[in-house]
Amino acid sequence: MIDLKLLTTLGCSKCDQAKKIIEKVQPDFSDMKVEIINLMEHPELAVKYGVMISPALIINEKVAFVGGVNEEQLRNKLMLIGEDT
């Protein structure tokens, strides 16, 4: 099981891009659970994960990407994690 959290803020264009990338790759990772979280509503998560920039992608409770991600980077990371589970 892959647990992915996307930490976002309102008006963040890179957050919107990250969400689209996640939606694009999600069908290829059937064991992935995705949660989109607005940091304005849950500021404690920024503290918990030590992120100061959005978007932040948290995969299995570890910070994987901060400030943006491209599709290739995300797919590679998810494939590595999938091999470990």
Image (cartoon, grey):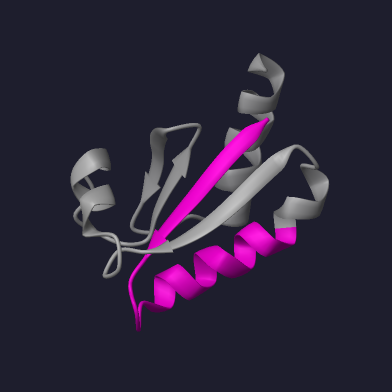
Residue at the image position 27 percent from the left and 40 percent from the top? 49
**Location of residue 53 (image quadrant):** bottom left
Start and end of the magenta stretch? 1-24
Residue at the image position 52 percent from the left and 64 percent from the top? 18
Q: Is residue 32 left or right of residue 63?
A: right
The image position of residue 58, as x and y in percent, is 43, 42
The image position of residue 40, as x and y in percent, is 26, 70
The image position of residue 37, as x and y in percent, is 43, 61
The image position of residue 55, as x and y in percent, is 37, 61
Q: Is residue 39 left or right of residue 35?
A: left
Residue at the extreme top? 84
Quarter of the image containing the N terminus? top right
Which of 44 and 21 lies nearest the eye of the viewer?
A: 44
Residue at the image position 57 percent from the left and 38 percent from the top? 3
30 up-or-down from 79: above or below: below
Residue 17: say if magenta. yes
Residue 32: say if magenta. no
